[in-house]
Image: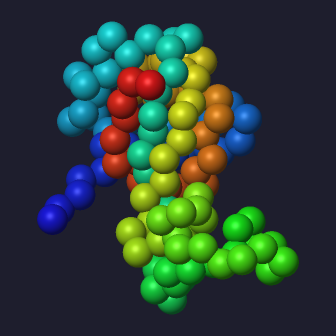
C-alpha cells in the first residue's frame, strides 16, 4: 500500500490553513467556501510505541473501563489516520482556510472529501 499526501497543514488553530500540493490543485475544482468537507490526515507526531497500543481508557479517564481503539476516537491507533469535519472559510488558489481542523501544523493531508 502506498499513500501519497495531497497537501500539508501549514497553520493550526481556529482558522487552520491547508496547502494542497500543486500537482493536486486541479482536484480543487468546485471546492467551495461555505461547504463542509472531511479532511483525512496523518498524525505524524504519534510515537511508534503508541501505534502498538490497542486498548485505552476513554478520554484518558482511568475510572472508565478500557475499550479497544476501534471503539474510541483516541489518536493511539495502528495507522494514525485522523478524520475531521471542517467548514471551508476561504480558498486562495491551492491554500484552504478551514474551521474545525484538529490536525497539528505539519500534518500531511491524505485526502479531502465532501461532507
Q: Nearer the viewer, residue 12 or 22?
A: 12
Q: Nearer the viewer, residue 64 or 108?
A: 64
Tell me: 5 left or right of 10: left
Total labels: the figure holds 0
Q: Position of residue 27 (x, y in %)?
A: 25, 25
Q: Is residue 35 above or below residue 9?
A: above
Q: Is residue 112 above or below residue 45?
A: above
Q: Residue furthest front?
A: 65
Tell me: 59 left or right of 12: right
Tell me: 48 left or right of 2: right
Q: Which residue is found at the position 37% from the left and 35% from the top?
A: 112
Q: Which residue is found at the position 71% from the left and 41% from the top?
A: 13
| Res. 45 visible in picture | no
Tell me: 102 left or right of 6: right
| Res. 52 visible in picture | yes
Q: Is residue 86 above or below residue 66?
A: above
Q: Is residue 58 above or below residue 95?
A: below
Q: Which residue is found at the position 47% from the left and 71% from the top?
A: 77
Q: Nearer the viewer, residue 81 or 56?
A: 56
Q: Residue furthest right?
A: 63
Colouring style? rainbow
Q: Position of residue 89 (x, y in %)?
A: 60, 18
Q: Where, quadrant-wise, is the C terminus in this rendering?
A: top left
Q: Position of residue 85 (x, y in %)?
A: 54, 34
Q: Which residue is found at the position 52% from the left and 84% from the top?
A: 53
Q: Position of residue 60 (x, y in %)?
A: 75, 73
Q: Where, quadrant-wise, is the N terminus in this rendering?
A: bottom left
Amino acid at each position: 500500500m502506498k499513500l501519497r499526501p495531497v497537501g500539508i497543514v501549514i497553520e493550526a488553530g481556529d482558522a487552520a490553513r491547508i496547502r494542497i500540493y500543486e500537482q493536486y490543485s486541479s482536484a480543487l475544482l468546485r471546492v467551495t467556501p461555505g461547504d463542509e468537507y472531511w479532511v483525512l490526515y496523518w498524525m505524524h507526531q504519534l510515537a511508534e510505541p503508541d501505534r502498538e497500543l490497542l486498548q485505552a481508557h476513554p478520554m484518558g479517564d482511568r475510572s472508565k473501563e478500557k475499550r479497544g481503539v476501534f471503539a474510541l476516537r483516541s489518536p493511539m491507533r495502528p495507522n494514525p489516520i485522523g478524520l475531521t469535519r471542517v467548514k471551508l472559510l476561504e480558498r486562495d488558489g491551492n491554500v484552504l482556510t478551514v474551521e474545525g481542523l484538529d490536525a497539528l501544523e505539519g500534518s500531511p493531508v491524505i485526502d479531502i472529501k465532501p461532507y
